């Protein structure tokens, strides 16, 4: 094992400082019996020698790498990016670091990243799955080591884990009902792949709203695509190839809503006069585009905080019994803007009131009353 | 070491399958002398037992964890988010995974994350530093193990590493000169903290452009802030408290440019008629806001590809001699839009021509000719 020689161990530190190995070990682990001065000497030497603790041994000893792994589909999307930042800030309060991986909506990548994070010996895992993950068994390895897993946003239906998600059924319902209330009678829904729970639930909400308001459900008015900008443009072409045009469009993500609006602008279709648009996620871009786009806020701050709270609870419990399927729902809220004939964009003053709202019963009520 | 018992080793796999330990080891490492059938049996059992290879030992044996670490200031910003995705996609072609960490512009966090990624035994590291990193010695640990490091965008001046960055001096120069050409005579520059190389260089470009065009440099027309939305709003208040107003503003990032535009809209200051605005980064938001904002494209696709190429070269070389300070410059390009009196927004058709442009001598020339 001569190749091991270049790697410094606590024996090297002990030799350099003429201390016992156990003293060095305890100093590195902040043992109370070791003086602050010795700890400092040891840590300084450890840094100097480029010593790195054996993550496996250290992890097994105290069960803590103090690192959480996060897998999201695409870090460039508003919702995962915001959630990542909130999770990281919250974790810091608990003394944990965050390492982030993106699956690019590839199941193959997700499986590989699960293994990478497993080898990195994270203390817990938060996952928003790919559009196509229906078998979640690549996460079993974490369960076997009692490493907590929390799924959020894109979540499994029947895999035994803690799930934290938005109220997607209600979101789909409210988005559609809002269009009905604004006078739409022929509403297109643009959905994502139905392998992903979010989109089935929002679609169900759309159907329910049509039914309640006695509007017919028309199969040819529902489109499925992969929610990218390119797909959305092609979907827009299909939608406006149908005559007559729909008078309302509920898109299941904001990238799609923005692209549809761009298509309408390019082809002289007046929004909201001829066709109203509602998106989903409350991406900041919906606020700065003209006309501004009505969307559904999923309160990423609330969701991020609950994810961290759940992980910390599970890390404390660290017991197989923690692996039950349980689901926590974060509220949603429709944010009315110009694209659905709502009020115009009131430019927010970011200094006095630009903070991200957190949905609670109280504020939700206050918002309703204001309307 | 009784706590070690729960961790499965190759001995357990060997016992379960009644194979020798060396066969199991070679099977797990895809040794050519082991049959495909045995490899499959071993790997299946490894999965079943929840076996994880000792990252340290495995890493030392073949020097490869096949994982690259990335530290960026904020993943929610357009430029780092785009770069991350490009780096990941490119790395995949080489069979590498990416784990991403964000420093939140905190030096303390950056030091901790360097240690986290060091313990995770990444094969290489790409870093865009915090606004305040001037001492880079927390990255020395990687050098001691001959682990390649590439800095990009926010980079050290005199730390011995490979640096890949945009042409910030030229960017600052072109942005300012463009405002001069559009008739501005009194141009504000909003800069970032001068601890960060990007902002000193863009500021130097601004000064150079003023000088070349015989416009006076006025100290009270240069503002420094931390480049967040809140800071930008406060800076806008300071700028427009000065009478007369400036007739042009060059902001060193797009978040600032967007916020300045919002401030102008809210206070009835006409853009571009009364005051022209140029941002930096070519964030997609600059394209969808009204008026659309002129900005400087930094070609993240090109930069991301060069980062990966440099890492792969350095991994191959894996030699201390690789740690020289060398700097590679990625070109920039001014993208003219409405906020500086440029042409209006031509809505791009993302299907036929929505691909991110990659700057090459040829395309840069073509763009120039078109103008």
Image (tube, coloured by chain):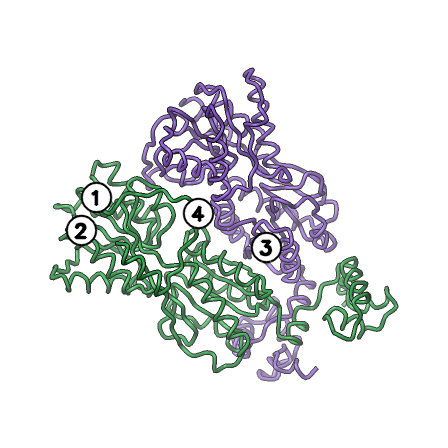
Chain colours: A green, B purple
Q: Nearer the viewer, residue A239 or B337?
A: B337
Which mark sits nearer the N-terminus, 4 or 1? 1
**Residue under numbered circle 1:** A272
Gap in angstroms between the C-alphas marked 2 and 1: 10 Å
> Mark 2 sits on what residue?
A182
Mark closer to the observer (4, 3): 4
Q: Nearer the viewer, residue A112 or A56?
A: A56
**Chain of the residue where label 4 is placed in the rendered structure:** A
Crowd tier of the residue under label 3, counting other residues whose Cα lies within 10 Å: few below 14, some 14–19, many 20 or above:
many
Q: CA distance from mark 3 to mark 1?
A: 47 Å
Residue assigned mark 4: A352
Same chain assignment for discs 4 and 3: no
Q: Name the spot of residue A93 as percent of width and height, x first.
A: 57, 63
- Distance of label 4 from label 2 (alpha carbons): 32 Å
Q: Earlier in the sequence, mark 4 or mark 2?
A: 2
Q: Are marks 2 and 1 on the same chain?
A: yes
């Amino acid at each position: 094992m001569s190749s091991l020689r270049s790697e410094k161990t606590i024996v090297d530190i002990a030799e350099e400082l003429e201390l016992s190995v156990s003293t060095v070990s305890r100093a590195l682990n902040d043992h109370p019996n070791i003086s602050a001065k010795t700890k400092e000497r040891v840590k300084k030497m450890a840094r100097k020698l480029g010593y790195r603790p054996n993550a496996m041994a250290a992890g097994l000893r105290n069960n803590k790498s103090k690192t959480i792994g996060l897998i999201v589909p695409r870090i460039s999307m508003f919702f995962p990016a915001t959630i990542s930042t909130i999770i990281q800030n919250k974790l810091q309060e608990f003394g944990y670091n965050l390492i982030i991986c993106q699956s690019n909506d590839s199941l193959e990548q997700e499986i590989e990243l699960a293994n990478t994070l497993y080898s990195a010996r994270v203390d817990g895992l938060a996952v928003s799955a790919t559009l196509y993950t229906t078998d979640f068994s690549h996460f079993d390895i974490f369960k076997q080591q009692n490493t907590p897993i929390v799924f959020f946003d894109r979540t499994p239906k029947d895999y035994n884990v803690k799930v934290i998600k938005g109220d997607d059924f209600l979101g789909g319902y409210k988005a559609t009902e809002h269009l009905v209330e604004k006078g739409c009678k022929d509403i297109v829904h643009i959905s994502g792949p139905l392998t992903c729970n979010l989109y089935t639930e929002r679609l169900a909400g759309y159907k329910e709203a049509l039914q309640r308001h006695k509007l017919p459900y028309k199969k040819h008015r529902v489109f499925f695509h992969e929610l990218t900008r390119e797909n959305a443009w092609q979907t827009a072409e299909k939608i406006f190839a149908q005559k007559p045009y729909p008078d309302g469009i509920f898109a299941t993500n904001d990238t799609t809503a923005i692209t549809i609006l761009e298509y309408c602008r390019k082809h002289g279709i007046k929004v909201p006069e001829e066709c109203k648009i509602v998106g989903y996620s409350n991406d900041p871009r919906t606020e700065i585009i003209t006309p501004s786009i009505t969307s559904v806020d999923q309160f990423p701050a609330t969701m991020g905080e609950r994810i961290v709270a759940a992980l910390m609870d599970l890390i404390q419990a660290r017991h197989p019994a923690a692996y039950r399927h349980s689901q926590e729902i974060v509220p949603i809220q429709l944010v009315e803007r110009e694209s659905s004939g709502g009020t115009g964009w009131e430019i927010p003053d970011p200094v006095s009131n630009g903070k991200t709202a957190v949905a609670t019963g109280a504020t939700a009520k206050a918002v309703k009353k204001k309307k």
